[in-house]
Image: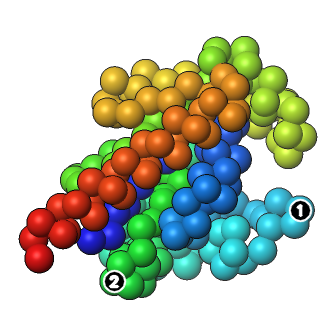
Amino acid sequence: MSRVFVITGPSGVGKGTLIALLRERVPQLELSVSATTRAPRPGERDGVDYHFLGEEEFDARVAARDFVEHASYAGRRYGTLRSELARRTAAGRPVVLEIEVQGARQVRTSLPDAVQVFIAPPSTGALRERLLGRGTDGEQEVRRRLAVAEQELQAQPEFAHVIVNDRLQDAAEQLVALVRGALANAAGQSAALD
């Protein structure tokens, strides 16, 4: 029985870093590669970090219902391709999705058994420092991402699991414990059905 884990939260909260640490400790967990209309950042590779799509191709895939979820975030579009998710779950592999809050809501509807985790910053000030510190966005983009983050932070009560990323190692341990527990529970349910 494969499990789907949805990791969401505002931009800059450390979702990607936490997922990397999670995958080191739970190596059978596969990352679904999202599609986006944003330009690649230095070092990012198409098909590895994201599927980089133009606006027209993204629109065509939306029309063809190729996405499990898709959302606009800070002026760009993101989505999870059905083919990405189906390929992994059909093989029985647990999958993690790193997606925006809008997308997490869509996944909640289409995949109600997915384990959804909201990653929160210790404060909006800390989030601002992280966004500035990564050096990938200008001041205007950081302001836009912070405005979106303030709205997203209000969504925390919608999620059964909230992890505050104050100290990275503590947050990673909480996330690992949660995922391992869900995988053990799924294995137990599968064994009970046999």
Residue at the disc numbered 1: 42
The residue that disc 2 covers is 90
Task: Name the image quarter holding the N terminus.
Answer: bottom left
Q: What x and y, as percent, mark residue 124?
A: 65, 17
- Image height check: is 171 above or below 8? above
User: In screen coordinates, is 135 left or right of 100?
Assistant: right
Q: Give, as a three-letter code, the residue at label 1.
A: Pro
Residue drawn at the location 41% of the way across and 26% of the way down: 156
How far apart are the alpha carbons under marks 1 and 2? 33 Å
Q: Inspect this view and state whether residue 10 appears.
A: no
Mark 1 surroundings within 10 Å by alpha-carbon count, few (fewer than 14), some (14 through 19), many (20 or more): few
Q: Is residue 156 left or right of residue 72?
A: left
Residue 133 spot, x, y in % from top left: 87, 33
The mark lying in front, picked from 1 and 2, is 2
Q: Which mark is residue 98?
A: none
Q: Which amino acid does label 2 sit on?
A: Ala
Q: Which corner quadrant of the image does residue 122 belong to?
A: top right
The image shows residue 157, relative to residue 38, as above or below, that is above
Query: Please, which colouring scheme is shown?
Result: rainbow
Residue at point 55%, 78% (across, down): 57
Of residue 171 and residue 191, the one placed in the foreground of this image is 191
* Left or right: residue 51 compared with residue 43: left
Q: Is mark 2 on a helix, strand or loop?
A: helix
- Residue 49 appears in the rendering: yes
Question: Which SS class for mark 1?
Answer: loop
Where residue 158 sits in the image (x, y, percent)? 31, 30
Between residue 55 and residue 37, name the one nearer to us. 37
Which of 62 and 15 lies nearest the eye of the viewer? 15
Q: Quadrant of the C terminus?
A: bottom left
Q: Quadrant of residue 148?
A: top right
Q: Which residue is drawn at 66% across and 59% down?
A: 24
Name which quarter of the figure residue 12 lies in: top right
